[in-house]
Amino acid sequence: MARKNTNRFRGGMAAAMVWLWTAGYVPAADVTVNPGADGTLVDGGVFGLFDGTADAADWYFNESTYEGAISLSRSGNLLEHRVVFEFNLGTVTYPTPVRAMFKFKLRGAARFPADPADVAVFSYPADVQETLTDFSAGPAQRLAVLSVSPFQALTSYTIDVSGPVNAAITGGTKKVGFRLQIDPLTSSLSSQAFMDILESDPTTKPSLRISDQVAGDFDGDRDVDLHDLAALPSCMRGPAITATSACQPLDADLDADVDLLDYARVLPTFTAPPV
Amino acid sequence: MFTIAIGPMLGLAVGQLSPLTHQMTWTQGLDNPARLAEADGTWLIADTRADRVVRYDSSGAYLGEWAEPAGPVGIAAHPDGRIFVSRRDDRRVAVHDAQYAFLGFLGIGAVSFVEPTDLAIDPLTGRIYVVDTGADRVYAFHSSGTLAVMFGSCGSGFGQFKYQTAVAVDPFTSRVLVADQDNFRVQVFDTAGMFLFSFGYRIKYLPSGTSAGWFTRTAGLATDGAGRIYVTDALMGTLRIFSPSGLELGEVVGFGANPGELQNPGEVALDGSGRVYVANANVGTVEVYDAPSPSMLAAVSPEWFSGTNETVSDRLTSPVRRTLPWYDKLRRGTQRLTEEGVTATSSWDAPHMLSDLSCGRCHNVPDQPLGHLGTLDGQTNLCLSCHNGAGQALEASLRTADRVLISLNTDSGGRSHAWGVSAINSAVGSVGPPAGSEMARYLSSGKIKCATCHDQHSQIAGRPYLRTKNDSGGLCKQCHAEHVGHTPRGSWQPTCNECHDAHNPNSDNLGLIRTDVRNRTLGLDKAVTLVARTGPGSFDDGDPAANDGLCQVCHLTTAYHRHDGSGAPHNNGQDCISCHPHDNGFLPVSGGDCTSCHAVAQDNGDGVPVGGRRAVVGEFPATDAHAHYGATLGGDACVVCHDMTTHQDGYVDLLDADDGSLYRFQKPGDLAGDPDVSNFCMSCHDPDGASRFTTPLDPFNNGNSPPAVAAKFLGTLQWDEQYGDFCFGTEGTLRGVNSHHDVRDADQAFSGAKIECLDCHGAHSAGASQPLVDPFHATQPWTGSNNAFCLSCHNGGTGPLDPGFPAGVFGPAIDTTDPRWASLGINWTTTLGGACVGGGCSSLRGIDSCDYVDGPWYVDYSWTHSAHGPDSKRGWNGYSGAPGADMDCTTCHDPHGSTTATNPAGNPYMIRDAIDGTAFVDDGTRSGGFNGPPWNAYGTGRPVVVPVSGTTVGWGAGSGLCGACHANWIQAYDWHEFCNGCQTCHGHGMAWGEADWVGFDNDTPCPIPNAASLGEFSVPAAMPGEPESPTRMEPQLHRIDRRRE
C-alpha cells in the first residue's frame, strides 16, 4: 500500500498571498485559494478597448450596490471584454501532483436576439501583478470553452486546472493566472456573458481549490483501486451535502460534496492496485 | 472588507468647465415637463401631469399644445415626421403623425410594455428605442414598428437595470446610452444591445476630493456631435458632461432656484447647433442654454475615479459607521416599528426598502459637506427627485409652484401641502407643531420640509412614512390645531384624510380636496369636484348630472345636498364653508357668515326646531353693529355669545360669559326661572365682564367694554317706595329697592313684578347708539325718542288692573296680606288706608298703582305739562328766555337702578348716581320775587345721593337730586326752608299754567309742616306773572281718598 500522506497542506500563511477560506482554520485535505489581493480583479469589470494602446481608457471599475459584474464580450474585432484572475500559490512546497479546481459562475446576456457566448478559459503563467499587459499575453493553455446561452441564469462552472497549477508549483513560479474571454475562435462576433460577483453570495466569487490528495484515493495510497471504490457508496450522499472528512478524498471536483460528478471524475482514474 | 480596487486618477479636477450661458426659460403652458424632443425645428414637451404635449419653436414662442391622455412620460420625433409618445397610465406608446393625428400604438402584438418611459430615435437607422422601466428592459423597434432588439433584465450586473430612466442614441455611432438610475450609472450598448461599458458611481469619494462620475439620480441623457454625453441628475440638480468613454468633463449647470439653475431636472436635449435644453420638471420650466464652447471642452482633461467598493452591509456593520447619525436614525426607526407592533424582520423592512429599494438609493451622499442637501430646498429635492411627475414615485408628485398650500379661504388651488414656508400660517389655521415635538424637530428654521411630516424610515401600520399616526387627523392637527375636524353625525367621524389628500398631482381641487371621497356608510367612493368656491364646480353647484359636491358625498339624510343629489335646494352654488366653517367642525357659525344664512327664516322641514332657522339680519341696525357696542357682524361676533356645538338642533344655546355654562332655549321666555336669559346678559354686564375670554372687558375685541349694570339690580321691588314723597305724610320708601326694573327672579317672586333685559334691549339690535328695542316688538330696534320709549310702558294703560305693559311684563302684584310685609314694618291698611286692600285693588299694578293717575308720579298723565317737559313751565312765555332743552327721563333716572360703592343702598326711585345738569339752567333765585331772565345759572355735574331717613326723602338735600340744577331752590320761596322733600309739592305733571304741586290749584297751600318739628310758616302770595301759589297740601291719605270720591 502506498504511503498515506499525512503531510497535509502546509500552505504559507502570508495573508496577502494566500487566502484561507476561514481564517485560522487549516483544512485537512485541501485549501481554497482566492484571487490574490495584490491587485487581481475580483470585483471590477474589465473593459478592453483593443486599440493597440493599453491605457486607462481600457479600464472600468464598476461601483454599485453589487460588488462586481464582469462583462465577457466580443463585438467584432475592436471590442473585447475579458477578465483575469491570478493566484499566488505561496512559497510552500506542495506535494505534487495536486488536484486544483477553478470555480466561477457565469450568466448569459439579457438580450434578444443574441448568440450563445462561447467563453474560453485560458491559463497562463501569472505574475500576480495583474496589469493591462495580461490581456495581450499569449495564453499558455486553452483549458475549456463554455457555452453560455442568452438569458442563462448565473451558473456554476468548475474547471480542472490541476495541470497549470502543478506546473506552476513544480516550475517554481507558484503563480498561475486564468483568463476568461469570448473564445477568439467562435464564429459569433456579437456574443456576451457576464460574471457577477456578489458579496452577499460567496459562491459567486471565483476560487481555486487545491488538494494534495489523489482524487478518489480514499485509503491514501495514491492510487484509485477497488479499496477506494468500495468507499464510494457510503460516501456518495449527493450534491451540496458536505462530505465527511474521511470522504473528502472522493470529492474529486473539490466542491465539498461527493456526488455523481465526483464519481464521473474518479472512475476514469481507476487502476488495479499494484501487484 | 471584501476587497479594494484602486484605479488611476487622471487629468484635472472636475469642475473646470464654465457654466453654460443661460438663454431663456420656457414656462407657458408647462406644468411638469418631463421629456423633450426636437421635431422639424420645433420642440415638443411631454407635460406628464397635465396630460398634454406642448409645442414651442426654437425661439421660445409657445405654439400650442395637444392633449395626450394617460400621462405622457416620453416623447421622440422620428425623421419621417412621426411623433412617438410613451404613456405612463395606459402603458402604451402612441404614434402620431406630424400633425399629431393619432396613428396607432407601437409594439402591439410584439410586446406588452410594463412601464414605458423614455424614448429615443436613432436618426441613422430610424430605430425607435423604448425604455420599459417596469420590465427592466430596453426595446428597439425598426422604423416599421417591428421589434428589432430587446435587452436588459433586473439586476446590477452589466446589461442589467434597476429603474432605468432615460435612453439616448449617439447619432454618429448609434451607441445606445441608458441611464440606470438605481445602479447609479450610465450603461452603453451597441445596436445589438450588447453591453459595451458603463460609467458612474454611487459613492461620492470625498476623501479623494472628487465627485467625478458620482451619480445620485440619473434622469436625462443626450449626446453631442462629438459623442460627449450630457447627464442630468435629478437629486443634485445638475447637468454634467462626460467624454464619449464616460470620463467626466465637469458640471455645466448647478442646483438652484435662480433662472437657469436646476432643481429637479429631467430630460436634456441638444439641437443641431449644440444648444442645450433641460426640462426642469418640478419647477415647471424648460431651461435653454447656449452650446458649450468646443474649445472649452477640448481644454478640459477628463477625469475618472475608482474608489472603495463599499457596500451597504459594510456601512451597517462597520464600527465607524455605527457612530453615524443616519445609522442611529435607521436603527431607531426600526426599533420604533417594533415598539408599535409592526413586525420588522430586519432593518431592511423599513420603508423605502419595501419596493426593492436600498439604503444606497438615498444614502449615497457623504456626511460632509452636504452641499445643497444642507439646505431646505436641497433636502426636499432628495424627495422630489423620485416623487416627481415622471419619477419613480409617481403617486406623490410635488411641484415648486405647488409648494404653498392655498387654503379654501383664498380661492386658489394647490396640489401639494406646503413646504418651504413657515409652519405658522394663520391663513390656514396652522400654529405649527408643538414645541419639542418630533415634527418641530424637523422644521428648517421654522419652515416645513418633507421630513417635518414624513419619516422616511418609519413604517407605521396603515400610514407609512409619517412622523406620527394620522388617525383622526393626529398628524394634521399637530399644526392645524384649530381645525377641529368634522363633527360626527353618525357612528363615525370623518378624519382629515377622508377629504384631503396632502399630495395629489392629478387634482385640480381646492384645499387639497380629494378627487374621490369615500362614503363609509355606503362603502362607495364618489367623485368630487371643487375647483371653485362658488358657482360651477363649487361645493354643490346644483348640477344634478354632476352630483359631485364634496359635502354630499356623505350626507345621506340631511335636508340638503344629499348623496344622491336629492334634498331641498339649499344655497346651491354657494360657499358651504362660509356658513359651515372648518374650524367649527363644519357647524354653521361666525358673524357675518352666520347672517348669510340667517338672513331669511327657514323651516328645515324636519320639524326641529319648529320654526326652523330664525332670520336675524333685520335685527341688526344698519348703521350700528351688534348690540355689543361696535362689534362688527363678521368674524366671530356671534360665537362670543352663541354656542354652536349642537347647532341646528332647534335650540338657541348661549354660553355664560363667565363660566361658560349653557343657556338653552327655543324662546327666551322658556327660561322662566333663574338662571334665565337676563342672567346670561348680566354675566357679561358686570364688573368682571366676560371673564371666560382672554379680554374679559373686550369680548368682541373691538375696544368696547360691556357696561356693568348687573350690580344695580339689588333689592326687592316691593311696595316700599310709594310713589310720592310727603313731608308730612307717610313717606313711602323703606329703601329695600334699588331698581324698579329688577330682573332677579327671587325679587320678582316677592314683588310679583317681572321684567327682563330683553324686554327693553334687543339681543341683536341693541347698539351703541341705540341700545333699545321696541318693548312690544322684541326684534325691532326702537326708533323713537328715549322718553317715548319709557312712556310706551309708563303710560298708565287703562287702569291699575291693566297698565298696558308688554306681554310678559308685570308690575308689582302684592298680596297685601302677605305676612312678610309685617316683618318689614309695613301695614298696608295703615299705609294705604285700606284703599288697596280689596275693593278692586287687591293687587298693585304698575306705576299707576293705587289710582295715582292724577299724581305727580303718574308721569304720562302730565308729562307734557311737567316742570321738565316742553309744555311745562319751561315753555311758559314768562320763561321765554330759558334754553329749550327738553329733558329725558334718563337725565335723572337710571333705567337699571342705582347703587354705588359709597351709596350701596342706592338712590330711591332709580335716581341716577350722578347727574349731569350742565345742559340745564335754573330759573334763578326768586326769593322775594321773580327775577326773570337772563337764565344764566346752569346746573352742575356731580354725584347724587338722595338721602332717605325713615320715610322722608331728601330730594333737595345738599347731595340730592334737585339741587344739581336748582342750586338756589331754597331762595325761590321762603318756606322752602322748611322742607327739602321737593316732590311733596312738585312732580312730573306740573304744567306752567297749573299749580306747581299736585292735584291742587295755586290757591291750595302747601302742606304745613308739623309745627312741632318744623315750626309755623305762612303761605306766600302769588308772585306777579306766576301761577297762583299752591295751597297747603293735604296729607297723602286724604288726597288718595279724595281721588276715589
Image: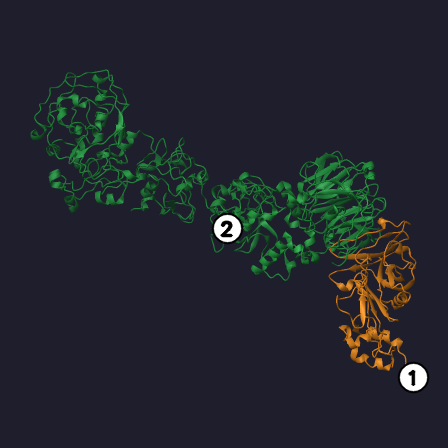
Chain colours: A orange, B green
For residue B249, what is the image quadrant?
A: top right
Name the amino acid type tagged 1.
Answer: Val
**Residue B771: percent from the left, percent from the top?**
34, 34
- Disc assigned to residue A275: 1
Host chain of mark 1 = A
Q: Secondary structure at mark 2?
A: loop
Nearest to the observer: residue B836 or residue B830: B830
- Is residue A113 at all visible to an observer of this figure? no
Q: CA distance from mark 2 to mark 1?
A: 103 Å
Nearest to the observer: residue B290 or residue B652: B290
Host chain of mark 2 = B
For residue B348, what is the image quadrant?
A: bottom right
**Residue A246: percent from the left, percent from the top?**
78, 77
Position of the C terminus of chain B, as image quadrant, is: top left
Q: Is residue B336 left or right of residue A19?
A: left
Per the image, the residue denoted by label 2 is B555
- Disc assigned to residue B239: none
- Is residue B907 at all visible to an observer of this figure? yes
Q: Secondary structure at mark 1?
A: loop
Nearest to the observer: residue B399 or residue B627: B399
Q: Is residue A173 left or right of residue B827?
A: right
Q: Is residue B860 left or right of residue B1009?
A: right
Name the amino acid type tagged 2.
Answer: His
Q: Is B464 situated above or below A11? A: above
